[in-house]
Amino acid sequence: MPSTSPSRTCLCVVPGISATPYEDNLRYFQVVIAGPQSSPYEHGIFKLELFLPADYPMAPPKVRFLTRIYHPNIDKLGRICLDILKDKWSPALQIRTVLLSIQALLSAPNPDDPLANDVADHWKTDEPGALRTATEWT
């Protein structure tokens, strides 16, 4: 018997990033980001959740990591400190840009604008150790 539910369409944003809407709520997307090469996250596959609020695109999407990650700009709840998700948001920005920016943040952590203060302190005082921990968590 054929399924009556709509099929889930994967939006392959770019190589290494995909976003698939949930069948029961097309405002929610399951996002998968491959860790960038030459980063401590290189061999990791990270799952995220993206939600488009009712006032999108006037308001930014809500994005959080579901996969645990050791990163100064991502806290234990998966929340992301990224300017375009907050005060630098513009309705002209696309979801693709947001996801590429998150992937770029994995390549270039910014411990001077942390969300996870303990991780940022580790990054500032012992960067090689922080990189090892990030790799181990990945």
Image (cartoon, rainbow, N blue to C red):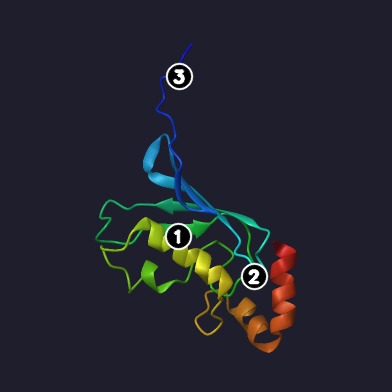
Q: Residue at x 39, y 62 (%)?
A: 97
Q: Position of residue 128 (x, y in %)?
A: 73, 81
Alpha carbon of mark 3 to alpha carbon of mark 1: how far?
31 Å
Report crowding for label 1: few under 14, some 14 to 19, many 20 or more residues within 10 A (C-alpha).
many
Q: Residue at x 47, y 71 (%)?
A: 81
Q: Position of residue 85 (x, y in %)?
A: 38, 67
User: What is the number of the mark on residue 39?
Assistant: 2
Residue type of the residue flagged with mark 3: Ser
Residue indicated by mark 1: 99
The tag earlier along the polypeptide, 2 or 3, is: 3
Residue indicated by mark 3: 3
Q: Secondary structure at mark 3?
A: loop
User: What is the number of the mark on residue 81?
Assistant: none
Q: Note whether 122 is above or below 89 in the view shown.
A: below
Alpha carbon of mark 1 to alpha carbon of mark 2: how far?
17 Å
Residue type of the residue flagged with mark 2: Ser
Residue type of the residue flagged with mark 1: Leu
In the picture, measured across the screen, residue 45 lies left or right of residue 110, that is: right
Q: Position of residue 45 (x, y in %)?
A: 62, 54
Residue 74, can we see it? no
Quarter of the image with the C terminus is bottom right
The tag earlier along the polypeptide, 3 or 1, is: 3
In the picture, measured across the screen, residue 61 lies left or right of residue 91, that is: right
Q: Residue at x 70, y 75 (%)?
A: 131
Q: Secondary structure at mark 2?
A: loop
Q: Position of residue 9 (x, y in %)?
A: 43, 37
Closer to the camera in the image, 127 or 53 = 127
